[in-house]
Image (cartoon, rainbow, N blue to C red):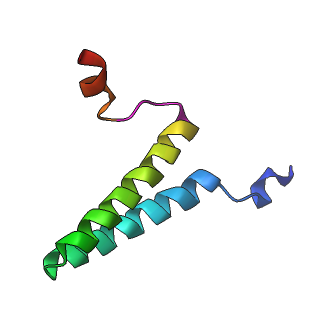
Amino acid sequence: MFNIFRRNPQKKLQQRYEKKLEEAMKAQRNGKIYEYSTLTAEAEAIREQINKMNNTPSTFSWCINER
């Protein structure tokens, strides 16, 4: 019954992920490539957390497994 009052941690992570990607895009448009790469790396780390919560593999895991 009280589950409706709980916050969804996955939704919060998804919002952080999207915000990081937007910040990275703005940095890239302004020519701040180093800032773009760090923000993109942070976004990828957040995406990995989301994937762990979903128990789904990363989109690049197929590249690693084929080697």
Residue pictured at 57% horizontal, 51% vertical? 10
Residue 63, quarter of picture? top left
Q: Nearer the viewer, residue 41 or 54?
A: 41
Q: Is residue 30 left or right of residue 59?
A: left
Q: Is residue 18 above or below residue 31?
A: above
Residue pictured at 79% horizontal, 51% vertical? 3
Residue pictured at 50% horizontal, 46% vertical? 50
Q: Nearer the viewer, residue 41 or 58?
A: 41
Residue 56 lies within the magenta run = yes
Q: Nearer the viewer, residue 48 or 12?
A: 48
Residue pictured at 23% horizontal, 78% vertical? 26
Residue 40, quarter of picture? bottom left
Magenta segment's dominant SS is loop
Residue 37: image x %, image y %?
Answer: 25, 63
Q: How many marks?
A: 0
Q: Quadrant of the C terminus?
A: top left
Residue 32: image x %, image y %?
Answer: 19, 78
Residue 21 lies within the magenta run = no
The span shown in magenta is 54-58
Residue 9: image x %, image y %?
Answer: 63, 55
- Residue at the extreme bottom: 30
Q: Is residue 51 left or right of residue 53?
A: left
